Amino acid sequence: MRVIVIGAGVGGMVAAAELARRGAEVLVLERQASHGGKMRQLSVQGVGIDAGPTVFTMRWVFEDLFADAGRRLSDHLRLHPAEVLARHAWRRGGQLDLFADPARSAEAIATFAGRAEAQGFLAFAAESRGLFLALARGFIAAERPSPLTLAARLGPARRAALVAARAWQPMWQRLGRHFRDPRLRQLFGRYATYVGSSPWLAPAALMLIAHVEQEGVWLIEGGMRALADQLRALAEAQGARFRCGADVRQILIEGGRAAGVLLPGDERIGADAILFTGDVAALPALGAGGAAAVVRREQRSLSAITWCIRAPTAGFPLSHHNVFFGEDYEEEFRAIFQRREVPDQPTVYVCAQDRGLAEVAPGAPERLLLLINAPPDGDLRRFDTAEYAARCFQMLRGCGLEIQHAASNTVATTPSGFNALFPATGGALYGRASHGLRATLGRPAARSALPGLYLAGGSVHPGAGVPMAALSGRLAAARLLEDAAGRRGAIRFPAPG
């Protein structure tokens, strides 16, 4: 069986490895010059800086993938557990670390905001764990359910856990039952942004991300790019072939099913099945618009403005992951999702990529990724990007961090740049925003409405993020192979809990 995988992001490479291991003839076509998708790296002063995902969690997803291929993940990636999950700072509100050890986090919160808030954190952590255990098998690691099939999969005990946690209540509202301190609601509400959403509109079920991080955040020697390289190597070792710089112009349809692709120069490549791993918003331009529901502008998830910088820093003790919060968090999301503007006082995420794995000598340049949330409209011409850079660095200086940045050591990417990298998205980085129950359950499934066309990646079930995209690749490969064999059944992968 010949399968074309469109896109060499995480979902595409995982699907290619899985399909090739199980006997398919796999060709991966990638429009960019290299593999990795959003897990890209930019060169600044000749040094590679991770410019996409920076947090590695749910290690078990990749251990299972490699184990099924007869390999051990630890033989291919050097992983180190992060003691500090993230360092958080407020311009007029202090500094707080979250730790891999919940007891240490509770003590830090008690010092930061009082003993009652520490108790609130422990209750929140227990609730997020319950949400994860309730949803891990029936939703995250399973084929996309409807509300009715999800209820059936969960069973009485897990349904009760979701009801007790009021999982479909807005996240911000639910956080208010655990924390009175607005800084802590900011901190834990930020988990909604991990899937490109607003904590005022996303469901409380996404609080499970807190438990995912509590189970382990890992630092990878060589950065996230090393993971991308090993996923491609795994796929190629199983027999998959890669062609980068291959821009698919059209998905060919014959006899009412996907039958191949059209490349520049009228090159046609036939296939028995197509697995598309780009954003589903791009399908109409490829002639397969009926394969998934069109994502409207107002449904798009967050975009971003990012800066990759190689420069010395001073004044603030950076960890690997750092968050510097703006004063008015609600206004930040109103600006983005209602007025379609970059916020005046943005929250700034800083990944200090040399921290945690080695010491950074004072005054020595280090690799940094800075990110602020932005509207997913793909066109920031009406904004002055340099002005927003100035606001970003002003926020950091207010928290004590000085970065010796200059045009020569900085590479910026805006929503228009992300839209060029990922067509038809407007720069949205997470597919459809997870605003409300319908949106959360409404991501496309692995099988599209067009026979022979399958879907994977961050814009489809189970959602955005590196491990979720990997799971989507496995789900799509399993469904494709089941259909090819003429049988249907549940798709099962191991999941903790």
Image (spheres, helix red, strand yellow):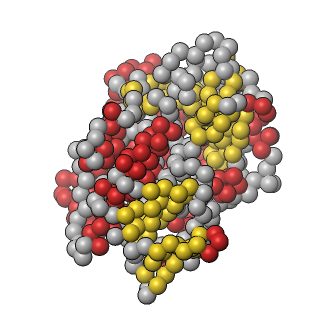
**Going by the image, does 165 lie left or right of 263?**
left
Is residue 15 visible in the rendered structure shown here?
yes
What residue is shown at x 48% (from left), y 22% (from top)? 356
- What residue appears at the point 49 percent right and 52 percent down from the top-left corner? 9
Query: Which residue occupies the foreground of this view, 284 or 380?
Result: 284
Q: Nearer the viewer, residue 478 or 193?
A: 478
Please, which residue is most extreme toward the left here? 156
Farthest top residue in view: 362
- Kindly give the residue lying farthest to the bottom in the view shown: 255
Identified at 59% across, 40% down, the residue is 41
Instruction: Return the x and y of residue 171 as percentages of the image width and height.
Output: 45, 49
| Quadrant location, the C terminus | top left
Residue nearest the viewer, comparing 102 with 241: 241
- Quarter assignment of residue 446: bottom left
Q: Quadrant of the N terminus?
A: bottom left
x then y, percent, for residue 432:
52, 61
Can residue 286 be seen in this snapshot?
no
Location of residue 278 with respect to 268 vertically, above or below: above
The image shows residue 239, relative to residue 319, as above or below, that is: below
Residue at x-position 37% and y-position 55%: 239
Quadrant housing residue 295: bottom right
The residue nearer to you, when weighing 225 against 262, is: 262
User: What percent of the width, then of the height, locates residue 83?
Assistant: 41, 23
| Residue 482 placement, left or right of 218 | left
Counting from the top left corner in percent of width and height, residue 60 is at 30, 41
Q: How many labels does the image show?
A: 0
Image height of 387 relative to 489, above or below? above
